[in-house]
Image (cartoon, rainbow, N blue to C red):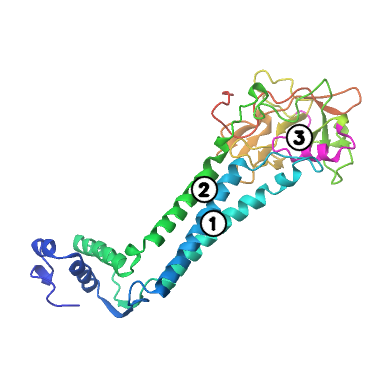
């Protein structure tokens, strides 16, 4: 480190001396103050404008452009590619099945190309520098921060990136498109209008809603899609829980409809049989939603939509394994612990003349996490 850096205290420059220094002098001073010794600094292209330099610059720019094009393709695919579920064998199933691979490949290629472009720019265009610095603990003072900023500006000049307009423009384009793509991931769902169907919008209804007067049974999954296992009260022991899905007789033999009922995100319901005599507090207007000791609640957590897959018969608590929300079955599935703020919606059930559990109606409130238009519930 130089012993005559300035005339101020400790040989440090005074404010007047700092103001009189050029950016190059400030950058050099930053190295001296930081005890940095540049051992080796060789530019890749000592003579600017050679063919080799232009080829390297075009190669780096090409990767930035590939990144930008891939990012733009991702945005287009995310918004306009057919994404709604299509049954196998129906027109459009091929395009629907490619939705996830297409958005994954385009976004992944965009990030990959951006990374390759940055690595190539460092290897091919930036000078090869070897420097040694003595490290010290503690906060930097105002002088150090000012000179470091000048050093960074000088580094931008020394790397020659400032004069490479093609690199800067292609990198800017790539970064802008990736930024838009990231925003689309976060906000893309808002692009589609969930209320286009008015009162028939899917957020208001689930597969448990009776249609055309057809009975909706509670069906359990046996692992065999075509095997219909409707649930009776005697199928469950006291203190047990069973996951059930909506089923209509018109779906018998139709594997696609059966699979769709099981795949629907708002369809799974937990059917719980409490121990006999367990006192339960019901919400106003829902006192008759249960059948004896049998209660049916949506399996979709009201926090972030995870499946509330666990039930503790010892204390009648329903658990969400994702963020540890707990709901008390004897308090009409009210949240008693964790981030969930609303009770699980209850499905009104009864036993028909055949002895099977059936849904009397759809849920009387929307299933899952909150949304702006959701009506306030207790």
Decide which of tag 1 and tag 2 comes sooner along the chain.
Answer: 1
Crowd class of label 2 (few under 14; some 14 to 19; many from 20; radius 10 Å) = many
Badge number at residue 153 = none
Front: mark 1 or 3: 1
Q: Is residue 10 left or right of residue 171?
A: left
Residue 167 against residue 214 in the figure, above or below: below
Q: To which residue does mark 3 refer?
A: 272
Q: CA distance from mark 3 to mark 2?
A: 44 Å
So how many labels did they put on this image? Answer: 3
Query: Within the image, what quadrant is residue 150 found in?
Result: bottom left
Q: Is 165 one of the magenta-colored residues?
A: no
Q: Is residue 272 magenta?
A: yes
Whether residue 301 is visible here, answered yes or no, is yes
Alpha carbons under labels 1 and 3: distance apart: 48 Å
For marks 3 and 2, the one nearer the N-term is: 2
User: What percent of the width, then of the height, locates residue 33?
Assistant: 21, 71
Q: Left or right of 51: which side holds 31?
A: left
Q: Which of the two labelled residues, at mark 1 and mark 3, occupies the earlier sequence position?
A: 1
Identify the residue at horizontal 78%, vertical 22% (top origin): 360
Kindly report which numbered mark, 3 or 2, lies closer to the viewer in this rendering: 2
Nearest the viewer among 366 and 164 is 164
Instruction: List x then y, in percent, for residue 221.
Output: 82, 41
Q: Which residue is mark 1?
A: 110
The residues colored magenta run: 251-277
- 168, above or below 251, in the image: below
Q: Is residue 105 left or right of residue 168?
A: right
Q: Is residue 323 visible?
A: no
Would you name the residue on which mark 2 appears? 181
Whether tag 1 and tag 2 are in contact, CB under 8 A, the answer is yes
Residue 365 % position (x, y): 65, 25
């Amino acid at each position: 480190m130089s012993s005559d850096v300035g005339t101020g205290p400790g040989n440090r420059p005074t404010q007047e001396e700092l103001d009189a220094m050029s950016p190059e002098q400030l950058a050099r001073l930053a190295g001296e103050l930081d005890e940095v010794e540049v051992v080796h600094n060789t530019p890749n292209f000592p003579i600017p404008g050679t063919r080799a330099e232009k080829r390297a610059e075009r190669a780096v720019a090409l990767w930035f452009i590939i990144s930008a094009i891939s990012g733009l393709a991702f945005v287009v695919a995310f918004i306009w590619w057919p994404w709604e579920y299509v049954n196998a064998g129906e027109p459009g199933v091929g395009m629907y099945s490619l939705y996830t691979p297409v958005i994954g490949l385009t976004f992944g290629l965009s990030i990959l190309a951006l990374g390759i472009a940055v690595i190539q720019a460092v290897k091919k265009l930036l000078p090869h520098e070897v420097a040694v610095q003595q490290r010290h603990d503690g906060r930097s003072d105002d002088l150090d921060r000012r000179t470091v900023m000048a050093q960074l500006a000088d580094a931008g000049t020394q790397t020659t990136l400032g004069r490479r307009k093609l690199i800067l423009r292609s990198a800017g384009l790539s970064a802008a498109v990736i930024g838009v793509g990231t925003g689309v991931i976060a906000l893309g769902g808002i692009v589609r209008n969930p209320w286009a169907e008015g009162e028939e919008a899917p957020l208001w209804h689930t597969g448990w809603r009776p249609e055309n007067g057809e009975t909706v049974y509670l069906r359990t999954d046996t692992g065999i899609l075509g095997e219909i296992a409707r649930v009776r009260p005697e199928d469950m022991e006291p203190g047990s829980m069973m996951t059930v899905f909506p089923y209509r007789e018109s779906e018998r033999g139709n594997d696609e409809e059966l699979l769709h009922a099981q795949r629907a995100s708002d369809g799974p319901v937990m059917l719980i049989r409490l121990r006999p005599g367990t006192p339960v507090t019901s919400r106003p207007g829902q006192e008759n939603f249960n059948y004896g000791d049998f209660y049916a609640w949506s399996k979709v957590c009201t926090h972030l939509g995870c499946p509330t897959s666990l039930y503790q018969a010892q204390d009648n608590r329903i658990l969400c394994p994702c963020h540890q929300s707990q709901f008390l079955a004897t308090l009409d599935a009210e949240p008693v612990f964790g981030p969930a703020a609303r009770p699980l919606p209850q499905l009104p059930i009864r036993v028909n003349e055949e002895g099977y559990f059936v849904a009397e109606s759809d849920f009387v409130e929307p299933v899952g996490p909150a949304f702006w238009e959701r009506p306030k519930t207790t």
